[in-house]
Image (cartoon, helix red, strand yellow):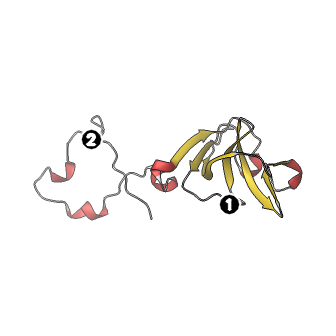
C-alpha cells in the first residue's frame, strides 16, 4: 500500500491555489488525475524511526552498497540474524550483515564467514536495520 504524502505547493509551478475548483464544479476527470510520486511513499514505512546515511566505502559491495549509496535505516524493524544493520563496534560505526551461527554472533561483509567480525560477548550498539539502499548509476 502506498501512503499519500502532502507535497507543499510550489508557487512557481502551481499558479492557482486550487486548480480543480476554478470553474466552480469538480471536473469529471478528477478521479483519473495522477498524483506526484514521492520516493518516501515507497521506501519509508515509519517516518519517525527512519534515518538516512551515505556509505563512505565499498566494503558492503557484495550486498549492493557502494560508496555514495544512500542507506535507509528503520529503527522500528526488529533486528535478527540475516539483517543488514548499522551498528557501533569499538567506537566505529559500521554497516554489516548480522549473522548468528551456533553460539556465536558475527558481523559480515559477504556470505563467507572468513570476512566476519566476531562480536560474541562484546557490547555493541545496533542503531537499526537497513531496509533500502539507493545507489547512483555513475559510480
Using the image as rendered, state which of residue 75 and residue 56 is in the foreground. Answer: 75
Q: From the top left corner, tell me how far across and down residue 60 is, in percent.
A: 75, 46
Q: Nearer the viewer, mark 1 or mark 2?
A: 1
Marks 1/2 in contact by CB < 8 Å: the verdict is no
Which residue is label 1 attached to?
80
Question: Helix or strand or loop: what does disc 1 sit on?
Answer: loop
Which residue is label 2 attached to?
14
Using the image as rendered, state which of residue 138 and residue 72 is in the foreground. Answer: 72
Q: From the top left corner, tell me how far across and down residue 90 is, in percent.
A: 75, 37
Position of residue 35 in the picture relative to residue 44 (left or right): left
Pointer 1 local density, CA inside 10 Å: few below 14, some 14–19, many at least 20:
few
Using the image as rendered, state which of residue 5 and residue 105 is in the foreground. Answer: 105
Pointer 2 local density, CA inside 10 Å: few below 14, some 14–19, many at least 20:
few
Position of residue 114 in the picture relative to residue 75 (left or right): right
Residue at screen point 20% across, 48% down: 19
For the image, the number of numbered tags is 2
Q: What's the CA distance linking mark 1 and mark 2? A: 46 Å
Question: Helix or strand or loop: what does disc 2 sit on?
Answer: loop
For the N terminus, the image quarter is bottom left
Residue at screen point 79% across, 51% down: 121
Amino acid at each position: 500500500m502506498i501512503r499519500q504524502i502532502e507535497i507543499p505547493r510550489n508557487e512557481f509551478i502551481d499558479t492557482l491555489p486550487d486548480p480543480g475548483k476554478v470553474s466552480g464544479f469538480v471536473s469529471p476527470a478528477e478521479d483519473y488525475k495522477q498524483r506526484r510520486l514521492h520516493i518516501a511513499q515507497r521506501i519509508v514505512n515509519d517516518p519517525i524511526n527512519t534515518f538516512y546515511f551515505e556509505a563512505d566505502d565499498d566494503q558492503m559491495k557484495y550486498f549492493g552498497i557502494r560508496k555514495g549509496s544512500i542507506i535507509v535505516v528503520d529503527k522500528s524493524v526488529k533486528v535478527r540474524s540475516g539483517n543488514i544493520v548499522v551498528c557501533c563496534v569499538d567506537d566505529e560505526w559500521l554497516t554489516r550483515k548480522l549473522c548468528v551461527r551456533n553460539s556465536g554472533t558475527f558481523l559480515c561483509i559477504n556470505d563467507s564467514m572468513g570476512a566476519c567480525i566476531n562480536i560474541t560477548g562484546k557490547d555493541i550498539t545496533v542503531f537499526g536495520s537497513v531496509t533500502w539502499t539507493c545507489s547512483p548509476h555513475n559510480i
